Amino acid sequence: RDLLWFRQFAVLLWKNFLLKVSRVGLFVEIGLILIVSVSLLMGRRIIKKEFCNASTFDPLPLTLPAFFINTSVVYELVYVPSESDVARNITEMVKRDLNANFKG
């Protein structure tokens, strides 16, 4: 019975030792992560990029479907986030570019 108490105490001391050591290990791990991240970012900035055999494509003409060209139909936008100025500007630009009859 005394031996069991001594063994439990030894395991407790060992776990405490591991916890103390792991704090130092934690700082080492965080430091290594930062060093590797900074070195990767600096490497990307320093190394010059070459684009060989780059492909460029001509734009395709976009035509609206026939049902959308019918201006006698009034379309309605179901959802437009009114809180966002950017979303509202994009919606207005799409309405203007489509040249369709939108309600509102």
Image (tube, helix red, strand yellow):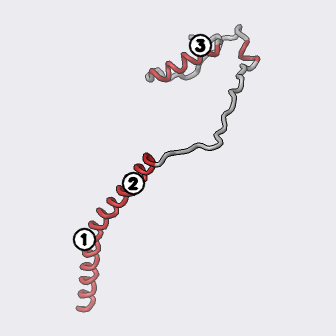
Considering the image in quadrants, where does the C terminus appear? top right
Cα–Cα gap, marks 1 and 3: 66 Å
Q: Residue at x 64, y 16 (%)?
A: 98
Identify residue for label 3.
96
Q: Position of residue 93 (x, y in %)?
A: 56, 17
Q: Which residue is mark 1?
A: 20
User: Residue 103 at what x, y percent from top left?
Assistant: 59, 11
Q: Amino acid at mark 2?
A: Ser
Q: Which numbered disc covers residue 39?
A: 2
Question: Residue most toward the top?
Answer: 72
Coordinates of residue 10 in the picture (x, y in percent): 25, 84
Q: Are marks 2 and 3 in contact (CB under 8 Å)?
A: no
Q: Regarding mark 1 in the picture, which secondary structure is present there? A: helix
Q: Is residue 53 left or right of residue 43?
A: right
Which residue appears at 39% of the width and 57% of the height?
A: 36
Tell me if residue 101 comes above or below residue 9 in the rendering. above
Numbered tag placed on residue 80 in the rendering: none
Q: Amino acid at mark 1?
A: Lys
Residue found at x 70% / y 22%: 62
Task: Please provide percent x and percent y for residue 80.
Answer: 52, 22
Type of residue at label 3?
Arg
Indicate which disc, 2 or 3, sits on the residue closer to the N terminus.
2
- 58 lies left or right of 82: right
| C-alpha gap between disc 2 and disc 3 | 48 Å
Q: CA distance from mark 1 to mark 2?
A: 29 Å
Cβ atoms at labels 1 and 3 below 8 Å apart: no
Residue at the image position 32 percent from the left and 59 percent from the top: 31
Vertical arrangement, residue 45 with respect to residue 88, above or below: below
For the N terminus, give its image quadrant.
bottom left
Task: Please tell me in which quadrant of the rendered image residue 13 appears.
Answer: bottom left
